Image (cartoon, grey):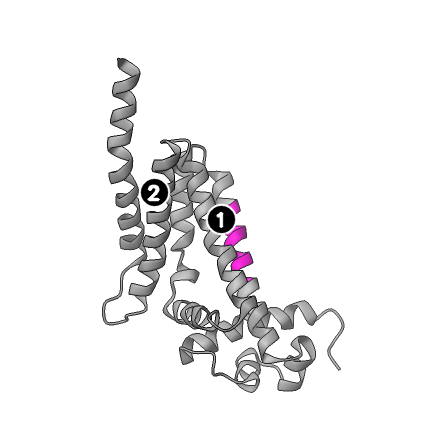
Amino acid sequence: MPKVGMEPVRRKALVDAAMRVIGDHGSLTVTMSEIAKQAGVSPALAHHYFGSKEQLLIETVRSHLQRLRDNTVMALRAAKTPREKLSAIIRVSFQADQFAPETIAAWLAFYAEAQRSEETRRFLVIYARRLRSNLLANLKALCSGDDAERIAEGAAAMIDGLYIRQSLRSAPISIEASIALTEDYINTLLAPLSRKAAFQKDR
């Protein structure tokens, strides 16, 4: 019988183990036994806490997206200006635990699963909308609505695209290079808009 007070610890261990095992396999064709072994618990205990592998996988997606959200909120609170907030969003997107090869492999497996699992797809859609919303809210303070929409879409696509590129282990991209590329993209598009705004103000 599970020890009293250990459930949150064991559940987190199983969620983290699921991410590692899926990342190592590169797919969701893993067993509850493999996940339980990685977490250091029995398969029976894993089933006790989650009921099925499918429920554990859903909780793994939800838990890691919640962690990403919490890190983003903390980073945004520490930034002062809209431009600093954009940089904070970019840094969080490429932080070390999110950009590790096994984590990226796991996320790609979850995206593939989203083609058949409505619940997985829902969580990933929430992530995509949240990323775009955070980018857009701060871009609107720096340029017009239409330009902000365009830059937000492009920046979000670049972040997702760099994750896919990172999965090609023969051509890895560092965290620093990924941040720099995304920053350059935003700066390149904002620069002429800033000059235009300054010119119109001086007229």
Nearest to viewer (mark 2 / mark 1): 2
Q: Indicate the position of residue 56 as horizontal and vertical percent values.
A: 59, 74
Q: In which quarter of the image is residue 104?
A: bottom left
Quarter holding the N terminus is: bottom right
Q: Which mark is residue 150?
A: 2
Q: Nearer the viewer, residue 4 or 84?
A: 84
Residue lying at 45% horizontally and 33% vertically, measured from the top left: 80
Q: Is residue 67 magenta?
A: yes
The part of the chain drawn in magenta is 63-73
Q: Please, is residue 154 above or below residue 47 in the view?
A: above
- Looking at marks 2 and 1 on the same chain, the residue that comes earlier in the sequence is marked by 1
Q: Please, is residue 157 above or below residue 26 in the view?
A: above
Pointer 2 local density, CA inside 10 Å: few below 14, some 14–19, many at least 20: few
Q: Indicate the position of residue 181 as horizontal and vertical percent values.
A: 26, 50
Q: Is residue 161 magenta?
A: no
At label 2, which amino acid type do we have?
Answer: Arg
Q: Can residue 22 be seen in this view?
A: yes
Asked whether, in this view, residue 159 is left or right of residue 16, the answer is left
Q: Indicate the position of residue 156 as horizontal and vertical percent values.
A: 37, 51
**In this figure, what is the number of numbered marks?**
2
At label 1, which amino acid type do we have?
Answer: Thr
Q: Residue 72 carries which label?
A: 1
Residue lying at 26% horizontally and 65% vertically, measured from the top left: 172
Q: Quadrant of residue 175?
A: bottom left
Instruction: Give the alpha-carbon distance from disc 2 to disc 1, as whole Å.
Output: 22 Å
Residue lying at 67% horizontally and 67% vertically, measured from the top left: 8
Quarter holding the C terminus is: top left
Q: Indicate the position of residue 108 as horizontal and vertical percent values.
A: 40, 69
Asked whether, in this view, residue 127 is left or right of residue 54, the answer is left
